[in-house]
Image (cartoon, grey):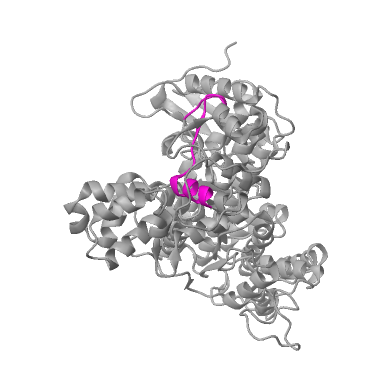
């Protein structure tokens, strides 16, 4: 029996909202052996988005992948391409440096239809069209055929994807229930939520909807029992109390009046209720695909988490802020940004971050007991600092738990900017509820499970040129388009560098573009040219350098001895690093995780892959190698030649 049956492309249908199934022309498709179905399940659950090879590998081999894992994975991909069939246009299943991407149209996948119906339902509810909203949300829920990917959950990675889908379904179910309650259909809601609320006893918004439905159906004692059971469970499992909004509603019910559910939808007056984001970038340029992914992921509800990853200067924060402003109508309880590093790039202590969040969101109880100040000031013995290293771990853990509990039932967007690692992010993620989190980080934060990772690469050449024109004036760039393109290329197409270069040119109106392009193309002085007021590209690169381990810095210094703008192979990297190819590969992978090294090639074996150092990272690494590895003077025009770095450890970076 063949591994998979080829299908006619235009008649494909797949389902992941239940057991994984596929059909072509109304006939079931044989999806192949277990490992191949695991690959397909992950690709479909993240349809139209690049899925990293590591994630697919973890899904198929959750413990120890075999040495032939990559080759086996390519076999499964090849067979799936046969299954999907051939058609005109881009390949349905393609590969890039970001991973494998499966292109699926909305009618071909139940998950995409579910998302579209849910978005339409929420938009109708926000516009006051409650009856159409309830109908659309119900249609979305009716697509579910049981627990998602129930037949493949033995794989932890697939189970995480399934949990993510199920959380999204719960969010839509809560939207539907609240809409039906406002329409006066309490009886239907009470019956529908009975089993669901028992399966998810810690979802406060779900419990609130059931409590209101029972009350409005005349089942007063049962409504009060829902609150009491929920309160006892929170106290026993988490040491917490129900939210003030739910407690207030409980007290209203004690009056035994059959009033309308004034708190059927979560209370919107206890949070910031608006934007605590920085101002949007007026000349924001490009990022159409990344924005689409963010709006789709975060705007669909269900406690989603997205991580923007990319090297320093790639525009992650600007993209996050822009997306936050676009999502304003999806998060009526507010949008908040908190930076997880200090100005010099050091990680902020968790108590300090919690205290700031408590102050910003009006939840003082979420601050650590020893954290009564959110801004630095003179030392005061009677006023302990929020960042004290001796803050009791139990207090910090309790404050973090209170913060997570405070998000239950609220639709708030939290932007965690410039995350130094997974630990602090993990403590701030909501356990349940409709709030969403958007994280920016230079690294991949591989330790975070069930998150949507979106790579933020350099701009396309046309986008970088457009951004430069918006800053200095399209008339000026149009007069010497070739020089403008040279400037964008010399900036490595990084938005930060292009913006700094544009700002500098806007101030130096007399400076010809061609002359400035020549300055930037000179390796000895390029970083000195990328300064505008107190904004310097070198400072951002310095922070990324400090993030590397000692061995990582040594490895990057050795790779920087390679010629500029050169794509290099694994054997060439091994020679530059002075270590065996097996360890050199792991070093390259570690540096790729930090954004210091890129791999712009397509689907090839490790020995055939090509790697590159982004231009500004390359120049900065050479400069730092001369300063700190060799101990030469900190001169600007350091020779751009090989550096005799100390020997690397035999262990991988």
Q: Quadrant of residue 379?
A: bottom right
Q: Quadrant of the N terminus?
A: top right
**Which of these two is toward me, 580 or 544?**
580
Q: Is residue 497 above or below residue 45?
A: below
Q: Quadrant of residue 529?
A: bottom left
**Relative image position of residue 483 (x, y in whole percent):** 25, 49
> Is residue 223 in view from this perspective?
no
**Relative image position of residue 415 (x, y in whole percent):** 54, 62
Look at 62% across and 43% down and name the residue there: 645
Q: Quadrant of the C terminus?
A: top right
Q: Is residue 637 shown in magenta?
A: no
Q: Is residue 620 shown in magenta?
A: yes
> Is residue 49 in view from this perspective?
yes
What range is drawn magenta here? 602-623
**Which of these two is toward me, 352 or 221?**
352
Look at 62% across and 49% down and name the residue there: 629
**Relative image position of residue 208 (x, y in whole percent):** 64, 66
Q: Determine the residue located farthest toward the top in the rendered image.
A: 1
**Which of these two is toward me, 4 or 28?**
4
**Relative image position of residue 259 (x, y in whole percent):** 58, 76
Look at 35% across and 46% down and name the residue there: 489
Q: Quadrant of residue 533?
A: bottom left
């Amino acid at each position: 029996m063949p591994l998979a049956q080829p299908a006619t492309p235009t008649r494909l249908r797949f389902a992941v909202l239940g057991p994984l199934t596929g059909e072509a022309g109304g006939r079931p498709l044989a999806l192949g052996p277990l490992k191949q179905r695991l690959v397909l399940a992950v690709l479909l659950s993240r349809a139209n988005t690049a899925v990293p090879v590591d994630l697919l590998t973890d899904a198929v081999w959750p413990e120890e992948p075999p040495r032939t894992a990559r080759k086996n994975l390519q076999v499964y991909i090849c067979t799936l391409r046969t299954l999907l069939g051939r058609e005109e246009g881009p390949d349905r299943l393609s590969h890039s440096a970001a991973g494998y991407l499966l292109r699926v149209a909305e009618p071909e996948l139940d998950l995409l239809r579910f998302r579209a119906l849910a978005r339409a339902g929420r938009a109708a509810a926000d516009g006051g069209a409650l009856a159409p909203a309830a109908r659309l949300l119900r249609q979305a829920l009716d697509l579910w055929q049981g627990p998602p990917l129930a037949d493949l959950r033995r794989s932890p990675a697939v189970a995480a994807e399934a949990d993510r889908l199920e959380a999204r379904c719960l969010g839509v179910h809560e939207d539907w229930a609240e809409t039906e309650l406002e329409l006066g259909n309490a009886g239907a809601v009470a019956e529908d939520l009975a089993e669901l609320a028992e399966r998810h006893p810690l979802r406060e918004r779900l419990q609130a909807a059931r409590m209101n439905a029972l009350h409005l159906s005349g089942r007063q004692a049962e409504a009060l029992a829902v609150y009491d059971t929920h309160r006892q469970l929170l106290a026993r499992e988490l040491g917490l109390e129900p939210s003030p909004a739910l407690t207030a509603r409980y007290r209203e019910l004690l009056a035994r009046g059959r009033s309308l559910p004034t708190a059927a939808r979560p209370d919107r007056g206890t949070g910031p209720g608006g934007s605590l984001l920085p101002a949007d970038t007026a000349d924001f340029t490009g990022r159409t695909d990344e924005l689409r992914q963010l709006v789709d992921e975060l705007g669909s509800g269900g406690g989603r988490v997205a991580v923007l990853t990319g090297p320093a200067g790639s525009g992650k924060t600007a993209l996050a802020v822009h997306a936050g402003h676009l999502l304003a109508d999806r998060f009526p309880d507010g949008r908040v940004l908190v930076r997880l590093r200090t100005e010099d790039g050091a990680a902020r202590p968790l108590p300090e971050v919690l205290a700031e969040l408590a102050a910003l969101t009006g939840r003082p109880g979420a601050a650590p007991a020893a954290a009564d100040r959110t801004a630095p000031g003179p030392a005061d013995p009677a006023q302990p600092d929020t960042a004290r290293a001796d803050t009791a771990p139990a207090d910090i853990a309790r404050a973090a738990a209170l913060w997570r509990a405070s998000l239950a039932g609220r639709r708030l967007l939290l932007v965690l900017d410039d995350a130094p690692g997974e630990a602090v992010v993990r403590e701030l993620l909501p356990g349940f509820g409709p709030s969403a989190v958007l994280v920016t980080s230079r690294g991949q934060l591989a330790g975070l499970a069930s998150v949507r990772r979106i790579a933020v690469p350099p701009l396309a050449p046309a986008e970088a040129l457009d951004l430069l024109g918006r800053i200095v004036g399209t008339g000026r760039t149009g007069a010497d388009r070739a020089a403008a393109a040279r400037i964008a290329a010399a900036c490595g197409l990084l938005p930060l560098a292009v913006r700094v270069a544009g700002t500098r040119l806007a101030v130096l109106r007399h400076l010809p573009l061609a002359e400035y392009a020549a300055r930037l193309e000179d390796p000895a002085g390029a970083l000195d040219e990328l300064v505008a007021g107190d904004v310097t590209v070198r400072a951002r690169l310095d922070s990324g350098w400090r993030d590397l381990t000692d061995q990582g810095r040594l490895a990057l210094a050795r790779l920087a001895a390679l010629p500029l703008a050169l794509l290099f192979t694994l054997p060439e990297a091994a020679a530059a690093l002075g270590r065996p190819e097996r360890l050199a590969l792991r070093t390259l992978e570690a540096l790729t995780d930090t954004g210091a090294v890129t791999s712009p090639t397509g689907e090839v074996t490790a020995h055939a892959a090509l790697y590159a150092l982004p231009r500004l990272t390359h120049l900065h690494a050479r400069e730092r190698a001369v300063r700190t590895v060799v101990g030469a003077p900190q001169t600007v025009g350091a020779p751009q030649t090989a550096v005799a770095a100390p020997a690397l450890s035999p262990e991988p970076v």
